[in-house]
Amino acid sequence: MSKLKLKLSFDKDCVTKPVIYELVKKYDVMTNILSANIEYGNRGNMILEIKGKEENLSLTLEYFKSLNIKYEIYAEAILWDESKCINCGSCTAVCPTQALTMGKDDLLHFDKDKCVVCQLCINACPIRIISVEL
Amino acid sequence: MRTIAEINEKIKKGKAVVVTAEEVIDIVQEKSYKKAYETIDVVTTGTFGPMCSSGVFINFGHSNPPIRMQSILLNDVCAYGGLAAVDTYIGATEVSQKRGMEYGGGHVIEDLIAGKDIKLHALSSGTDCYPRKEILTTINKDNINQAYMFNPRNAYQNYPAATNSTNKTIYTYMGTLLPNYGNITYSTSGELSPLLNDPYLRTIGVGTRIFLGGGVGYVAWQGTQHKVDVERSANGIPLVHAATLAVIGDIKGMSTEYVRGAVFDKYGVTLFVGVGVPIPVLDEEMLKYVSVKNSEIYTKLVDKSGNVNIDKKYNYAELRSGTVKFNGKAVHTAPLSSLDVARKIACTLKEWINRGTFELTEKVADLPCESVVHPLEIREIK
């Protein structure tokens, strides 16, 4: 079983298509929509996690290409350089899923599973130690 | 009643009892004020937050032939050229002429303290006694004469928490504030914060020896915008901006663990500065002040877009919990100043005093106990 985290960008022609249904039905992949901002009849984007057999994930990407859906593959989560962190907490102000939180020990905690790679923390970090690998 | 001289005698003999402003809270809860007062001599405090009004005076030494520097760049960040020939002041918020907001005065100061080489480029119109018109070289903290931090305003006694009433994200010195009261940020070390432990500045004044940036520093003066005549809680703690300190200290003793250049997104460059003040427990009244806890320290909430006058205050225990109720909804709260580093500062200061390497000082003069902060009027030029 493999896993991919993707940012999909739809233009107005493909937002009318039942893409997620197709992924499940045709390619047997498990989908988890982490964030979506789609207006019917307009453009939109989605952060999507897919799990499945490696060949099915490749076919899924081919399917996106065929529909002209642009995709970027994310690293699993943001990269946080813990050794340089001053634990100020500024990044927690913008994290929408509470992947970044201040613990009872007053240190920054990062829960990789909750991260939707929205990247808001990258610029909110005053020390510039958060990045993302595409 | 005990005096600072008596405390210093104990420090010399290694007999002074020193605890941090967090530790004292538990001690007072276990013992009575009277008993705790009998044992505790000094309480140490600490804070590590973004403090824009900070900078470093530098003397570069003279080149041969000499130059009277008028336009000065350090790693492409402009430093002040209006002092004597090879003196300058680099301010924390100045931004790089090449890299913009991603690098600035705060980062130059951090790099200087780290011992890195800094590119110096200076221009002059040339004079009979200073004929050189341009210099390009590198400097570091070991080959310059003096480099001392002088921060016109640090260690704000209290600071309002910030939120945003508009329907757009705003980018401020209080961090990124999400639309429609989407979050609240605050900046304090609360019960560990120097001036919250001596709300009327009984023991802190001109000449007070402090921890500054990892080294030893001094309170030089009242900080800019110093204000004491403000709204206070019954325990004397100000509910808004109040007292501030101007501080001074040699950067050669400092460490980048306690001085860090920083960027506030779409706002600008600043500097995280570590400040710690030792507070002598002169009497039971001082013990009451230093044992204040987060749930007793309130701050007002301010709309940073400037549109809405919010009448709401929270204490720091509530803000630290991660969510507070606002307009009936749970709103996420986030700190901007590092409690972890503040705690390290208070512990380091405690260790210095315990080792006998740091003695307390009597203040030379009080900070003003009456002061007004004037707004800037726009007046017609005649």
Image (spheres, rainbow, N blue to C red):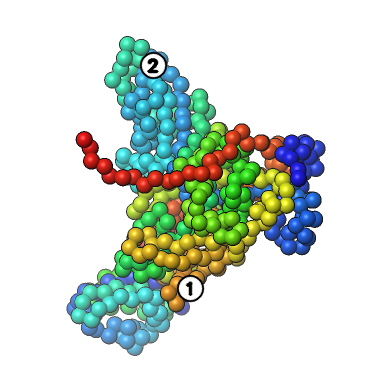
Which quarter of the rendered picture does the C terminus of chain B lie within?
Answer: top left
Which quarter of the rendered picture does the N terminus of chain B lie within?
Answer: top right
Give the amino acid type for the residue marked by disc 1 in the picture.
Lys
Number of marks in the image?
2
Q: Name the residue rendered at 61%, 33% in the picture.
A: B364
- Of helix, strand and loop, which one carries label 1? strand
Q: CA distance from mark 2 to mark 1?
A: 63 Å
Depth order, front residue of A47/B6: B6
Q: Chain of mark 2?
A: B
Whether residue B237 is visible to the viewer of this picture, yes or no, is: yes
Which one is earlier in the sequence, the residue at label 2 or at label 1? 2
Residue at the disc numbered 2: B66
* 2 and 1 marks on the same chain: yes
Whether residue A76 is visible to the viewer of this picture, yes or no, is: no
Query: In this rendering, is residue A88 above or below B141?
Result: below
Query: In this rendering, is residue B56 above or below B63?
Result: below
